[in-house]
Image: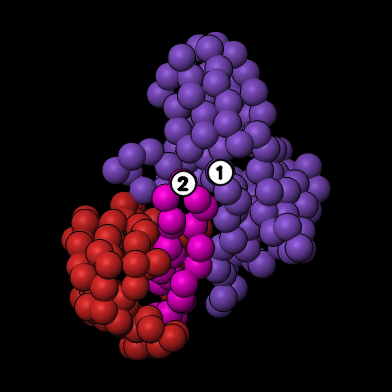
Amino acid sequence: SQQGEEDPQALSIQEGENATMNCSYKTSINNLQWYRQNSGRGLVHLILIRSNEREKHSGRLRVTLDTSKKSSSLLITASRAADTASYFCATDGDTPLVFGKGTRLSVIA
Amino acid sequence: NAGVTQTPKFQVLKTGQSMTLQCAQDMNHNSMYWYRQDPGMGLRLIYYSASEGTTDKGEVPNGYNVSRLNKREFSLRLESAAPSQTSVYFCASSEKWRIARNEQFFGPGTRLTVL
């Protein structure tokens, strides 16, 4: 399976701090995506990075991709209480999106 | 635009009962997906439909069947429910699998309990 695996499983930070989550995967990919899931809700797409890209920004989000290490990181800057959620990476290769188990982020006001 | 809708939102079944989970999207997407989410397991793909008229197995298809009724609708059927199928089920759609921008849009989920 090419399932991504997020690290850490859980992260607790103070409002205003930066949050970094990592994702590792096993096989070659076309792109890697990050999704957010608020408690009890469906997933929401955050950002997509293609296999030939190394870094991408969207608002307070910064994603990096290192295909040689088969890893990606998601940085959320200046976190807010509303960023409290689970974050999933998903890889897209020869099969439809394969999701990791997620990182639970708690931002304390 | 409603996006991706799922019915029902909650369901309780007894072991051996059958039911169909409904999913519809109004974004004119070609590809649709069914996932289940269990605590600590992330999302696992049950079945997907890359385009109207096609369906394929995902990672955990056993005990399920699907029907791509038309471009908008993709249903998931449990023929004989088992307690191991207690989960939250998500339907998703995307413009087209295997294109460069394949972000998926998710429905709100169906919480299924099998007693």
| Res. A54 in view | yes
The one nearer the camera, A10 or B66, is A10
Q: Residues within 10 Å of mark 1 (few under 14, many from 20)?
A: many
Question: Does dot 2 land on a helix, a strand or a loop?
Answer: loop
* Chain on which label 1 sits: B
Q: Which residue is mark 1?
A: B109
Nearer the viewer's eye, disc 2 or disc 1?
Answer: 2
Amino acid found under the numbered disc labelled 2: Gly
Secondary structure type for disc 1 = loop
Rendering coords of residue B45 (x, y %)? 48, 46
Q: Residue at (52%, 39%) from the top-left corner?
A: B89
Q: How is the image coloured?
A: by chain
* Horizontal side, residue A89 vs residue B76: left or right: left
Q: Colour of chain A?
A: red
Residue named by callout 2: A40
Question: Is residue B2 depicted above or below A69 in this figure?
Answer: above
Q: Outermost residue, right direction? A: B70
Q: Is residue A90 above or below residue A50?
A: above
Amino acid found under the numbered disc labelled 1: Gly
Q: Is residue A43 magenta?
A: yes
Supply the letter of whichever chain is purple. Answer: B
* Residue at the spot 44% in from the left edge and 80% down from the top edge: A50
Residue at x 66%, y 67% (from the top left corner) = B95
The dot on residue A27 is: none
Give the residue drawn at x 38%, y 83%. Answer: A60
Q: Which residues are magenta?
A: A32-51
Rendered location of residue B1, percent (x, y): 76, 63
